[in-house]
Image (tube, rainbow, N blue to C red):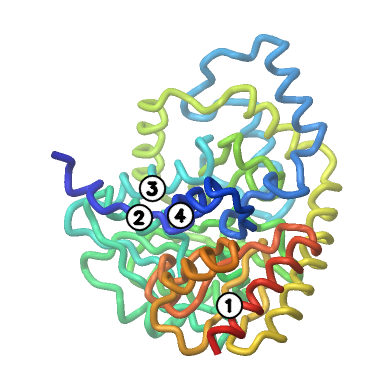
Amino acid sequence: MVTKRVSGLKYAIRDVIAPAKEIEAEGHKVIKLNIGDPNRYDFDTPRHVKDAAYQAMLDGKNYYGDSQGDHPVIKSVAARDKRFNGSEADAYLLTAGASEGVYFSFLSLIGPGDEALVPSPNYPQYMSVSQLSGGKAVEYLCDEDNMWAPDLDDMRSKITERTKLLVVINPNNPTGAVYSKGMLKQIIDLAGEHNLPIISDEIYDQLVFGEYTSLTSLVKDTPLITLNGISKNHIAPGWRIGYMAFRNCPDIQEACMAQGRVRLCVNEPAAWGFKAALDGPQDHVEETKKKLLRRRDYMMKRIAEIDGLSCVEPEAAFYAFPKIEGVSDDKQWVLDLLHKEHVLTVHGSGFGYAGRGHFRMVYLPPVDVLADAFDRIERFMAKRI
């Protein structure tokens, strides 16, 4: 018999793939707008980054790397953070994607009966890892009427003696929201008031269309773990290279370092590619943003033209979180759209209670693919109404 910790685990973004595969097996083409993987569309890892990883293999860097991050890439990570947001960490740990940093953090801080305060809507992994840790994710509201900004009063009301950490996702997945400097300062003050460590997920921090302030750049004394990596900013999600940056939390830092030793190391050639991404040309970042901005603007235009849909304009990343008027079962809506029009999105309720009545889609595809997808969505909505 399987343990309680894995029984009923869900991950909405990939759970919807199974029915899509059934439709494809019947000979239909499915337009997939469910997974935030730029490389599945017309984006690619920069050549100098790929060359560096390949050269590392040719140079014999195919050995076990250092577990704790005593690696040349750490110096590049530190230099990048100081250059980009003016922050300096006490220590860094390389991870198998930022996702492994989520696991390390939760396993260090959350046990049976403990609670993690996570945003709603949220990236589903935070809910699942809370369960795997034996604890519970408690969702604080992000307000759609306020550009999906966190509701500080709701956040405060959810803090109890069982709360062991506070998660902030900025820029946000799934909403594309970017939080103001003032908002971030208030969150830091609230965490400090309750002596709560903060996990700041900043994986999309360079894919922002306007102004951006890193929470990491504002922290002074609050215990902080920052998560980031190569997957989004440098278009290499399959490489599974990320990092944790620690501030003011030596016990948590050592607990995560110990887990790093247990799992041995990250992918060594990919780590050298990450170093090239950090040290080398950044032209790909601006090019990526230009393409995404054109696609976002087209998507927003199409959503505005469809009766029954509305959407807060995303300010970063490559996700939109449209609202579906008059829908009580958003998962069924997503499945119906898939079966009738062969467009795959993700049900909003899979991202927490505040996601109910919404769906998440990526706007990574070229405009002609988005146009086809929205023609189908528009037809589907017209038939519903």
Q: What is the three-letter code of the residue carrying label 2?
A: Lys
Going 39% across and 39% down the picture, which residue do you hit? 256
* Residue to which mark 3 is pinned: 105
Query: Badge 4 is on which residue?
Result: 19
Q: In the current view of this chain or complex, which residue is farthest to the left?
A: 1
- Residue that numbered label 2 is attached to: 10
Q: Earlier in the sequence, mark 4 or mark 2?
A: 2
Is tag 4's residue or tag 3's residue first in the polypeptide sequence? 4
For disc 1, the neighbor class at 10 Å (few under 14, some 14 to 19, many from 20) is many
Closest to the observer, 184 or 378: 378
Q: CA distance from mark 4 to mark 3?
A: 33 Å
Report which residue position mark 1 lands on.
322
Mark 3 and mark 4 in contact (Cβ < 8 Å)? no
For residue 199, the mark is none
| Mark 1 to mark 2 CA distance (whole Å) | 22 Å
**Any part of residue 171 in sight:** no
Q: Secondary structure at mark 2?
A: loop
User: Residue 306 location, x and y as percent?
Assistant: 67, 85
Indicate the amino acid at tag 4. Answer: Pro
